[in-house]
Amino acid sequence: MQQGANLPGLGSYNRSVVLGAVQISGGISRVEIAAMTGLTAQTVSVIVRRLLEEGLVREDGSEPSSGGKPRTILRVAPEAGYAVGIHFDPGGLHYVLADLAGRPVRTSRSPVRGDHSPERLTARMGTAVRRLLAEAGVPAERVLGIGLACPGPIDQPSGTMVHPPRLPGWGKVPIGDLLRAATRLPVTVDNDATAAVIGERWAGLGRTAASLAYLYLGTGVGGGLLLDGRIYRGRSLNAGEFGHITAVPGGPPCRCGNLGCVEAVCCPDAIVAAVHERLAGGAGGTLAAAFRRDPSRVGHARICAAAAAGDPVAAQVIGEVAAHLAGAVVTIVNVLDLDLIVLGGPALGPAAEIYRSTIAEAVASRAFTRRLRPAEVALSPIAADAAAIGAASLVFHAAYAPDPATLLSQGTRRP
Amino acid sequence: MQQGANLPGLGSYNRSVVLGAVQISGGISRVEIAAMTGLTAQTVSVIVRRLLEEGLVREDGSEPSSGGKPRTILRVAPEAGYAVGIHFDPGGLHYVLADLAGRPVRTSRSPVRGDHSPERLTARMGTAVRRLLAEAGVPAERVLGIGLACPGPIDQPSGTMVHPPRLPGWGKVPIGDLLRAATRLPVTVDNDATAAVIGERWAGLGRTAASLAYLYLGTGVGGGLLLDGRIYRGRSLNAGEFGHITAVPGGPPCRCGNLGCVEAVCCPDAIVAAVHERLAGGAGGTLAAAFRRDPSRVGHARICAAAAAGDPVAAQVIGEVAAHLAGAVVTIVNVLDLDLIVLGGPALGPAAEIYRSTIAEAVASRAFTRRLRPAEVALSPIAADAAAIGAASLVFHAAYAPDPATLLSQGTRRP
């Protein structure tokens, strides 16, 4: 059942709207905030005064105005709050300390070893977070919380990982609780790709698009959705599993239990296996000699670089993978009729432009709404760090993003 | 940019929330409305008094209460307003006169002839609407408007059909304007499948699910989306084109210009062609004799009935089609993490249960979130009439559905 709206919610919602306008603009006057948000000049003025008192926003110079009196420019005070983002991927751990403007202040990385129990891993995360803060000279009191981006599925609100396909043995791990115990900081857990789309909303291309899909290429293939200006998570908070769109009906088995998923044919392991198979079968090109000496020297990063440089075997395999991804993106666009597709994640590597152009061409020539307003396809400007920056943004997003739901009364849930 | 919230919006939003609670419940007390919506007893009481004065709601009996005094039951006054729904499909025109409770009061059907120009067709629609109202004894003043459900893509807000794949020659037809001129009634145009999902929200299974996808099987294959309790339309109002998910990569050409779309292999024409091909190739079963006498006697309706009765050729073809649809539904569930998939539309026919069970089995065994909370798969209780009832509901939905957007100020749009 839909909830009624109440008055107390109005103030905190409008406060988030104003803070969001300042954050997204990078510098804005009170008059511009009123024009953008539809709030009265007086309401904006009252809210800004409070944000200045709290130190979340500061006055920073002025700009000439047509009316005569110059307008004071407001900016987010980056040092007013920090958040730690942790991206936990089977391929490694990536830490980012971000300021309130969404900028990474300090980062670090460490490998994930096969023998890690959840308890040992979260204890190591706690040590790494303390080191990161010490190196940056940021006291723990200034940290609003930790955002943890994990492979899905995630069960919420407990923050439990449930049978992640690439982490056998992590059956039902309450990783949020474990990390809270290890750090004594508030912890927000989310799906890695949802974290990336929140990062894009906060610090990247998502600042202006109303509806976007984020296609995330990491150890696996994931995604996140921003629909009508809001993060869409789905009933169990696992929307956007683009890696489990079928690419090859009846194709190779996927770790999720289905056959022929995008992830099964497009992930780095699948790319390496396909290139190795062709080289073992006698294909030539710039990788053949290295492969004959030691197949392990022809890894994913090298294959992407070779494809970008025009090596025929690598380019063919990456081209096939790009075509599978393009088919999935056309499906996503046909299902959701989007403004923008953002490509991100560390596995794009030097092949990023091959993926972008193949997908853009498919959307422009095959998507159902192509004659109306074709969706754009763009590379994330924060691609390699998207999930970690996004994880940090989870904390800011939870604290400051305007959510119309806060307007609604907290009555009994659906009948 | 997100809009701030204003006070005047609050009242009309809460009015819609209360009316929506009465409409969805089928009979509810003021105390129950307050509990469901989170509004105070006094706010509910004030709003209900106004709805009673306007004649949209009426008091209808009472129920015992634990507190002693019996509670008065409120119901929507069905005769307070009517809407005409028109479903325009290449296969035919379907008219429904619905009352405010969403119940069909009177229906009619007519064929679409190949020689119809848009002007002649909308003139015929006008004649049919006048006849429908006269037969039902409903004066035109009591009609809130006409909802017109058309094959997509639709360009909004003009209500223009843009190159619908199954209606060659209807390149850029302002069908909303033409119908308005022909009837002098307000006209709301939408995609047929979006209309069906609004119908489901208003009168069917969508009353309780927060997020659902509606898979619509008609002359083509379409769909609609309800996400987080709101109709999701996409940037050009053509979200939910499930018929253009790829079922067979590189498969048969689809009218949309892509290859191997669900629609190309699952629409009634494709089913008939597949059965005819097998019968022409010598396959036996209960349809073979009729096919030898006259292939045109083995049409889609007969094939569906034969499949339901166990004919091997029909059952095999329908089984393959159901498997393609199931793959598309697993994709939709993986992308959107839904509560419910509703199957509807006239082409389900007697094969409905084959489709439902095949799709339900695939979602339960292959969807990514199956271990958390598997999505349900259900047949629409208003299947054959869904788009026409939905078209009528478009009118009510526009007039009465609670939309949190009404809370927001109408300032300048995004920067």
Image: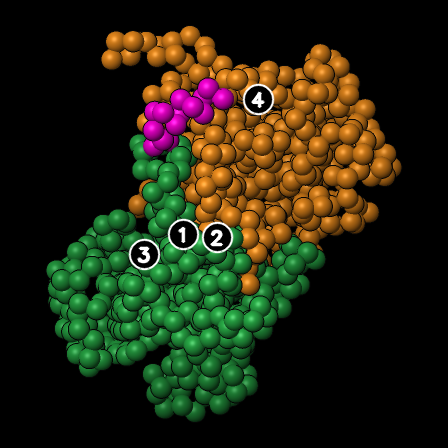
Chain colours: A green, B orange
Real-space Cα separation, disc 4 to disc 3, in angstroms: 40 Å
Q: Amino acid at mark 2?
A: Leu
In the image, residue A172 lies in the stretch drawn in magenta: no
Magenta residue span = B37-50
For mark 1, name the chain. A
Q: In the image shown, does B195 or B341 lie closer to the viewer?
A: B195
Above or below B396: residue A176: below
Q: Is residue A384 visible?
A: yes
The label number, if any, that marks residue A14 in the structure image: 1
Front tag of 1 and 3: 1
Question: Which one is earlier in the sequence, the residue at label 2 or at label 3?
Answer: 2
- Of circles 2 and 4, the one toward us is 2
What residue sits right under mark 2 in the picture?
A39
Compute the Cα span from label 4 to label 1.
35 Å
Q: Main secondary structure of the magenta part?
A: helix
Residue type at mark 4 is Leu
**Mark 3 — residue?**
A398
> Which of marks 1 and 2 precedes in the sequence?
1
Question: In the rendered structure, the residue with mark 2 lies on which chain?
Answer: A
Pointer 4 chain: B
Above or below, A227 relative to B312: below
